[in-house]
Image: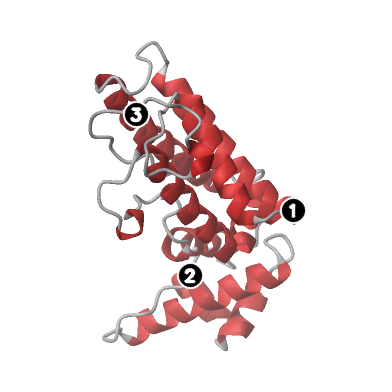
Amino acid sequence: MIDEPAPSGATPEPRTALTKGQRTRYNLLISAESVFERLGFLDARVADIAAEAKVAHGTFYTYFESKTDIFRAVLTEFLPPIYQKSDYGGATNPTPFQRVEFGNRRFLDVYRGNSKMLALLEQAATFDPEVKVLRTKLRHTAERRIRRNIIRMQEDNIVDPGLDAEIAASCLVAMATHSFYTWLVTDKRDYDMESAVITLSRLWGNALGLKSESSDRPEYRSVTSTTKGVVESLDLDATS
């Protein structure tokens, strides 16, 4: 683990009734986020964070043990819940394909707004065991939610009951997360994101054998029969 030992995803607004200590800690967190995004995890130093927060170097260690400690705190407290359940944009009774698309759009928005911190999460996970555990936890949370929803659709005869729900969920999460990470973080592909989201959602829906409905986009209406039954959320839910 590369770290500075102690010497002995959209930033949330602080609550109005914070104590002095809470305000100092919050200030350190937002300062650390700025420093990490500017310098990267490896090059950032505790001294840089303290300077950004305009506090003494020793004050940092009152609240955090190390650079890695505050990095984990920034990830867990500031990074939006990447895999949080979608509200479907206010739509009522969305179709299965629409549910998939809503989830992918929300995921795209999170990646767009937090691409630097998500890149740092991937970087730090390669050498910090605790950050790796956090990253793995996020992924497994997503897989569990999607697995449950696939099983519900199998029970409603919407998805082939012979499909291994656990493996299918893992495949779908891998496809979506790697696609957004490649498009927006590593390669910065110059794709039309509207087309990219629709294409990804179509691939996802077709992989599960979802049947399109009359209210779906033309891109999804490649299968004539319609789905029956109530389908639960197919969101990407793990970042916590």
Q: Which mark is residue 10?
A: 2
Q: Label 3, secondary structure: give it.
A: loop
Residue visible at 58% across and 62% down in the picture: 112
Residue 82 percent coordinates (x, y): 45, 53
- Amino acid under disc 2: Ala
Marks 1/2 in contact by CB < 8 Å: the verdict is no
- Residue appearing at x 34%, y 53% in the figure: 88
The residue singled out by tag 3 in the image is: 226
Q: Amino acid at mark 3?
A: Thr
Q: How busy is the neighbourhood of tag 1: few (under 14 within 10 Å), some, or many (20 plus)?
A: few
Q: Secondary structure at mark 2?
A: loop
Q: Please tell me in which quadrant of the rendered image residue 58 appears.
A: bottom right
**Dot 1 or dot 2, earlier in sequence:** 2
Comes first in the chain, label 3 or label 2: 2
Q: Position of residue 159 (x, y in %)?
A: 36, 21
Q: Name the disc covering residue 73, or none.
A: none
Q: Please state the horizontal and vertical placement of residue 214, each as a whole percent of the image.
A: 37, 39
Can you name the residue that lies furthest to the top here?
162
Disc 1 to disc 2, how far (Cα)?
Answer: 23 Å
The amino acid at mark 1 is: Arg
